[in-house]
Image (spheres, grey):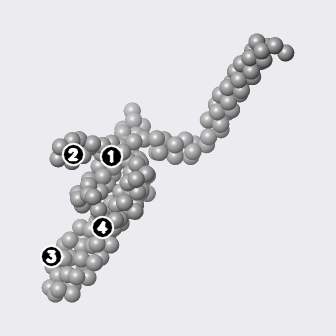
Amino acid sequence: MERKDIEKEVAELTARAEQTDKETEETIKNQLTVREHLLKRKRNAIVQIKLNDGEDDFVIETMLLSPKEQTDIISLQIKMATFKRRILKAKTDKQVADIARKSTELLSQFYGWAGKVCIDPELNEEYWQAGKDFTIDVPLQIIRETLAASQQSRQDLICFRKK
């Protein structure tokens, strides 16, 4: 076999392999269940949280929250608000200390949620739980804006369905 014939055959085999890959990919896409499509949609939808470090703007990307995740975060926010009210009504230092300890545990859960929703693998739960290199407002803003965007997305779908 001559070199030209070999190159031609390699090119034909490569083209056939690429076509087969495309057909296989299309077949797999067609076989996705509705549930898999919904999960894919949730993972591919990105919320951009705009922040400023005092000099420059930057963005932290998060994923949308499922209705269950939204409910869990709202419950956590309600608990946190309850503890804030209880600390104002506390009459002894022991009561204040106990409420503050429980509030710290709840704040730790907020940090956990920040790690769950952030797309950047470096901004994981361990990073936020360590409590370094950021102020407390950042993870709270991430959660608040991600929750708002997720609820807006759901509201957009509801409005679309009414049409």
Residue occupied by mark 3: 88
Q: Amino acid at mark 1?
A: Ile
* Mark 1 closeness class: few <14, some 14–19, many ≥20 residues within 10 Å: some
Instruction: Give the image quarter of residue 1.
Output: top right
Residue occupied by mark 2: 52
What label does residue 138 carry, if any? none
Give how far apart the Cα atoms at labels 4 and 1 are: 20 Å
Q: Amino acid at mark 3?
A: Leu
Q: Is residue 27 above or below residue 113?
A: above
Q: Is residue 124 above or below residue 90?
A: above
What label does residue 107 carry, if any? 4
Give how far apart the Cα atoms at labels 2 and 3 are: 32 Å
Q: Position of residue 132 (x, y in %)?
A: 29, 62
Instruction: Give the image quarter of residue 7.
Output: top right
Q: Are marks 3 and 1 in contact (CB under 8 Å)?
A: no
Q: Is residue 99 above or below residue 44?
A: below
Give how far apart the Cα atoms at labels 4 and 3 are: 18 Å
What label does residue 60 carry, if any? 1
Mark 3 or mark 1: whose residue is earlier in sequence: 1
At 70% from the left and 21% from the top, the residue drawn is: 15
Mark 4 or mark 1: whose residue is earlier in sequence: 1
* Mark 4 closeness class: few <14, some 14–19, many ≥20 residues within 10 Å: some
At 38% from the left and 47% from the top, the residue drawn is: 62
Q: Secondary structure at mark 1?
A: strand
Give how far apart the Cα atoms at labels 4 and 2 are: 22 Å
Q: Position of residue 53 (x, y in %)?
A: 21, 48
